[in-house]
């Protein structure tokens, strides 16, 4: 029992990154040797607009402690307008999660361009710290999915 | 009611419409059900009273595929749903002959039961033409009375107005029964702490039996293929009331109709477990109104929905945290 208590909490974080900006931003962070925690698992999506609210809920259900979505800056979308729609969707979804009593720091949207390796790295470090302070996600987890 | 029947008979007889979509009496005095009438004789079973809460707009999706016109009876609030369905190209306006029926608020049998009325045999005062402010209920244990307003559905207390938004003709008078603000309850929940909110929704949603009635009745939920019908969907079974699955189902159900929900309140009316499902839809409506300007789905057949539109200076999702 005492062994469990000593184990450090390692959050599981899912980051949805758009192929054109944020994923390239992550790449730049890597090639510039900027660190970000290994707890962040990146999922590449064609556009931030591809992120369905269900993706985010499902990530939580399967045991993620935090979900962050990164896309091109508004106005810079590769498909012209995708991230504007994503912005509205995510605003409503996050507001709903807040409404049912989920700590609202668990979800975040950040616009990261392909040139912003530093921003990617600092954002991820910040987000991981935030989730560490919030602790394990128990409210959205499906117990049957626990490994 | 007789006026509607007479008009329906005329329209059927002169061949303007091939069928009539209305309500027929159920097995109890308070559960009329939606029905098609294809002949003048069958219209003897037609009823329209205070318990005809069902929104017939959704039935027009199937009726639009049938040969000939359908006469459909729509209450003022149902016409919003019909408009929304036209906008989404789900119903054919030319296949519908819309009779706007009068409405003075619809009744909720559960609210009558909650007042301790049991063994109901018959109910007087629920007819649309009745002027009385009270219902007279004949029960096994004698006669009881109950105020009409106290027995109304929650949605009728926040009535959207007595005007039909789309119709070919109107039969009967309507009444605006609004006496409350529809966002009061939502605002009350928003003011709670995260723990209280979570406990509140846990308590409400753990009652869910995943019967899908809320989805099936919803005029906005009209996809031919639904994500919830996939057996690969994580919450396809009802297994663990403590888990996230009910919340996931209800968030996604409400999200899929966000910006298109006319707040007709059918989801809450049909829920066999009495879950206040409209609280989810209204939260989205409230947010949309606050963030993107007032919007009423179904007000017309042209305007773009808030989730299929954007402006360059929309609020950032981070506002949710900043609002506190």
Image (cartoon, helix red, strand yellow):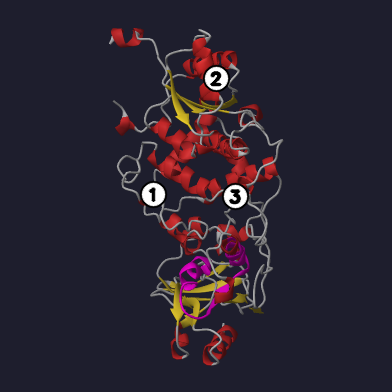
Give the answer, above or below, for where B53 lies relative to B252: below
* Image coordinates for residue B98, horizontal then vertical, percent: 59, 76
* Image coordinates for residue B300, horizontal then vertical, percent: 67, 62
* Image coordinates for residue B258, horizontal then vertical, percent: 56, 48
Q: Is residue B145 left or right of residue B295?
A: left
Label 1 and label 2: CA atoms lie apart by: 36 Å
Which of discs 1 and 2 lies nearer the camera? The answer is 2
Say if residue B181 shows up in the picture: yes
* Residue picked out by circle 2: A25
For the residues beneath circles 1 and 2, the answer to whether they share a chain is no
Question: Marks 1 and 2: CB-CB under 8 Å?
Answer: no
Residue B71 is inside the magenta segment? yes
* Image coordinates for residue A34, horizontal then vertical, percent: 52, 9
Residue at 59% x, 33% y is: A78
Q: Secondary structure at mark 1?
A: helix
Residue at 41% x, 21% y is: A12
């Amino acid at each position: 029992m005492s062994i469990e208590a000593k184990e450090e909490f390692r959050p599981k974080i899912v980051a949805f990154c758009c192929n054109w900006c944020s994923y390239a931003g992550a790449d730049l962070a890597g090639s510039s040797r900027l660190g970000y925690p290994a707890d962040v698992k990146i999922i590449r999506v064609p556009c931030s607009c591809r992120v369905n609210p269900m993706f985010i809920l499902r990530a939580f259900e399967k045991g993620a402690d935090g979900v962050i979505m990164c896309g091109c800056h508004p106005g810079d979308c590769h498909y012209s307008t995708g991230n504007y729609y994503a912005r509205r969707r995510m605003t409503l979804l996050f507001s709903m999660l807040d409404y049912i009593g989920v700590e609202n720091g668990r979800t975040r949207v950040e616009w990261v361009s392909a040139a912003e390796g530093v921003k990617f790295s600092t954002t991820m470090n910040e987000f991981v710290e935030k989730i560490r302070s919030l602790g394990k996600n128990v409210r959205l987890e499906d117990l049957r999915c626990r490994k | 009611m007789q006026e509607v029947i007479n008009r329906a008979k005329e329209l059927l007889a002169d061949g303007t419409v091939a069928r009539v979509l209305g309500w027929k009496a159920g097995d109890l005095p308070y559960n009329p059900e939606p029905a098609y009438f294809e002949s003048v004789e069958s219209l003897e079973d037609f009823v329209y009273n205070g318990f005809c809460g069902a929104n017939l707009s959704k039935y027009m999706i199937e009726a639009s595929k049938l040969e000939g016109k359908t006469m459909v009876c729509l209450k003022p609030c149902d016409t919003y749903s019909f408009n929304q369905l036209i906008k989404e190209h789900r119903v054919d306006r030319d296949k519908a002959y819309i009779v706007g029926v009068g409405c003075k608020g619809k009744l909720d049998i559960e609210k009558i039961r909650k007042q301790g009325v049991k063994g109901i045999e018959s109910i007087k005062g629920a007819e649309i033409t009745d002027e009385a402010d009270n219902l007279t209920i004949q029960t096994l244990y004698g006669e009881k009375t109950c105020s009409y307003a106290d027995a109304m559905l929650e949605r009728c207390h926040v009535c959207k107005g007595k005007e039909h938004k789309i119709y070919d003709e109107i039969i009967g008078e309507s009444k605006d029964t609004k006496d409350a603000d529809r966002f009061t309850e939502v605002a009350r929940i928003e003011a709670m702490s995260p723990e209280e909110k979570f406990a509140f929704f846990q308590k409400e949603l753990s009652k869910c039996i995943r019967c899908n009635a809320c989805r099936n009745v919803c005029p906005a939920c009209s996809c031919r293929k639904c994500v919830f019908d996939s057996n690969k969907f994580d919450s396809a079974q009802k297994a663990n009331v403590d888990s996230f699955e009910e919340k996931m189902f209800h968030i996604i159900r409400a999200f899929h109709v966000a910006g298109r929900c006319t707040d007709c309140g059918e989801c809450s009316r049909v829920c066999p477990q009495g879950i206040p499902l409209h609280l989810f839809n209204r939260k989205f409506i409230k947010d949309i109104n606050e963030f993107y300007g007032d919007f009423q789905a179904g007000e017309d057949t042209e305007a773009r929905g808030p989730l299929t539109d954007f402006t360059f200076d929309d609020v950032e999702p981070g506002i949710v945290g900043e609002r506190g």
